[in-house]
Amino acid sequence: MMHELEPALKKAMSVLEFLSQDDQARQQYEARQKFLRDEASMIEGAREEGLKKGLEEGIQKGIKEGEAESKRKIAINMLALELDQDTIIKATGLTISELDELKKEKE
């Protein structure tokens, strides 16, 4: 196994020796490494921000859908109790057209 690493180690040693002898080459190398680290950090930050935003949007959408379904179920129960349309609309916040749609589904 050590034999397999030998060429990689030789190359690393060669690069290290070259960089230690030439200040300008070392500075260029360090600048390039800093650029790569900064770029990786920006990408990771953007990814995390995107995930957070997507999660928040997903949660908000789920809450809205849950609230809408709850209103529909309450309205269905109120229709079953034969309450008047105005009372159901005031209690649930549904529109007349939404309530009419539920009535059609009930039939």
Image: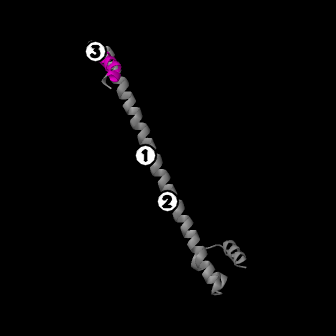
**Residue 49 magenta:** no
83 on left or right of 7: right
Residue 21 visible, this orientation: yes
Q: Which residues are magenta?
A: 3-17
Find disc 3 in the rendering and name its residue.
17
Disc 3 versus disc 2: distance between alpha carbons?
Answer: 55 Å
Farthest residue, direction left: 20
Give percent across and percent down for residue 60.
51, 60
Label at residue 59: 2
- The residue carrying pointer 3 sits among few (fewer than 14), some (14 to 19) or many (20 or more) residues within 10 Å by Cα, namely few
Give percent across and percent down for residue 23.
28, 14
Query: Three-letter amino acid code at disc 2?
Result: Ile
Residue 21, compared with residue 9, is above or below; it is above
Identify the mark nearer the N-term, 1 or 3. Answer: 3
Find disc 1 in the rendering and name its residue.
48
Which secondary structure, mark 1? helix
Residue 87 visible, this orientation: no
Q: Quadrant of the C terminus?
A: bottom right
Q: Residue at x 37, y 24 (%)?
A: 32
